Amino acid sequence: MTASGFVSLPPLTDTDLPTARPPEVVANDGFWPDIDLVQLRDAIRLDTTIPTNRLIDAVRNAMLDMNRQFDSWRDTIGLGHATLHAVPPRRMIGDVSDYVLLYTRALYSLVGADLGERLLSQMATAAGDDRRESLASEVSQHRRNARWAISDFIGRRRVVCELL
């Protein structure tokens, strides 16, 4: 007799209400904002098929990339401020600084592009061609959104050009 691996659980009762998941946070360097993985998954529509350790790796690499790109900005505009939240914003959207919004948008987009590129490299069947094209388009959109958020953050104009 072989076991099926199926485990029956008793039905939920009113006393067994689900609880909210605690935030899973990847700490940044202290100046730049930490990243909540639950919010990130929601923002770029990642389900739980992406393992947390892979997501953390993508977030840390995006942090390194973003923080390096913003070194000179931090040395001028951010100088004398303990965190990005403390830097006087150009604009507030609700109660959030435009700098924080743009930083997180760029970082989320870099993470989405990185994870999408990893999936692209794993697709090798003819049946996946349609999904591959769709995913390649999503990766391009994430890269574009990251470039635009970075440009907006440092106050550089966006440039769109196409080779003919």
Image: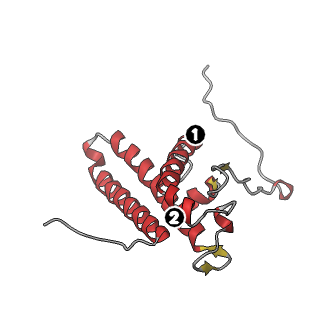
Please state which of residues 18 and 64 is positioned toward the viewer in this rendering: 64
Amino acid type of the residue that numbered disc 2 sits on in the rendered structure: Arg
Q: Position of residue 116 (x, y in %)?
A: 41, 50
- Mark 1 neighbour density, 10 Å: few (under 14) some (14–19) many (20 or more): few
Report which residue position mark 2 lands on: 105
| Quadrant where the image shows the N terminus | top right
Residue at x-position 61% and y-position 79%: 93
Report which residue position mark 1 lands on: 53
> Would you say 2 lies left or right of 62 here?
right
Given the current orientation, which residue lies at the most extreme right position? Answer: 15
The vertical placement of 66 against 145, above or below, is above
| Quadrant where the image shows the C terminus | bottom left
**Rounded to the nearest whole Å, what is the CA distance between mark 1 and mark 2?**
21 Å
Q: How many marks?
A: 2
Secondary structure type for disc 1 = helix
Residue at x-position 68% and y-position 77%: 95
Q: Position of residue 131 (x, y in %)?
A: 33, 53
> Would you say 65 lies left or right of 22 here?
left
Given the current orientation, which residue lies at the most extreme left position? Answer: 164
Amino acid type of the residue that numbered disc 1 sits on in the rendered structure: Asn
Toward which corner of the image does residue 17 lie, by quadrant?
bottom right
